Amino acid sequence: MATTSLDVRWLRVLLGSVAVHVVGIVVSVTLIVAYSVATAGGSVGGFAGGLSTWILPVLTLPAAVWVAYGARREAAAMNGFLVGLLVAGMLGLLFFWPNGLRSLALFVVIITSGLAGGLIGGTAPSRR
C-alpha cells in the first residue's frame, strides 16, 4: 500500500488562520467606528453583529490563496481546506460554537471559502 504526503504547510496554515481573525477584528472595528460617526452615534448593534461574523469567510479566501500559492496542486486544496477549518474552529472556540442553522451555515461557508481559496491558489504557477 502506497502512502503519499500531502505537503501541508503548517506554519502558513497557522499564520493565515490567525491573520484572518486579526485582520477581521481590525476591519470590523474600523468599519463600526466609521458607521457610528456617519450615523452620528446611531445604534450599531445590528450592523456590528453581522459584519463581525460574516467578514470571516471573505477574509478566509485570500488567506487560503496565500497559503496554497506555489504548493503542488494536489496539496493546495488540502492546505486551503485546513485554513478554513482552523478559522472556523478558532471562531467556535473563541466566540461561539454553531448551535443553530444560521451559525452552522457560517461555519460551512468559512470552510468552503478556505477550500475555494486553496483551489484558486493551487492553479497559480509555482515560483520554483
Image: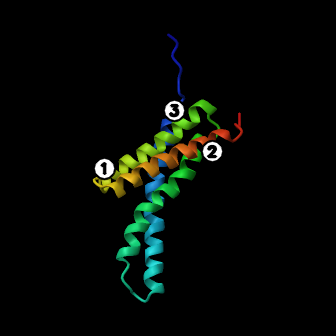
Which residue has dot 3 on it?
8
Callout 1 crowding tier (Cα within 10 Å): few <14, some 14–19, many ≥20: few
Residue 85 left/right relative to 75: left
Q: CA distance from mark 3 to mark 1?
A: 23 Å
State the SS at label 3: loop
- The furthest residue to the top: 1
List x then y, in percent, for residue 25. 43, 63
What amino acid does circle 1 point to? Leu
List x then y, in percent, for residue 22. 44, 58
Q: CA distance from mark 2 to mark 1?
A: 28 Å
Choose top left, top right, bottom left or bottom right for residue 122.
top right
Residue in the image at 46% along x and 80% along y: 35
What amino acid does circle 3 point to? Val
Q: Earlier in the sequence, mark 3 or mark 1?
A: 3
Residue 30 left/right relative to 126: left
Residue in the image at 48% along x and 55% along y: 57
Q: Is residue 122 above or below residue 90?
A: above
Residue 126 left/right relative to 119: right
Q: Earlier in the sequence, mark 3 or mark 2?
A: 3
* Numbered circle sitting on residue 32: none
Colouring method of the image:
rainbow
Which residue has dot 2 on it?
120
Choose top left, top right, bottom left or bottom right for residue 125.
top right
The answer to whether the residues at label 2 and label 1 have Cβ atoms under 8 Å apart is no
What amino acid does circle 2 point to? Ile
In the foreground, 80 or 34: 80
Which residue has dot 1 on it?
93
List x then y, in percent, for residue 16. 50, 48
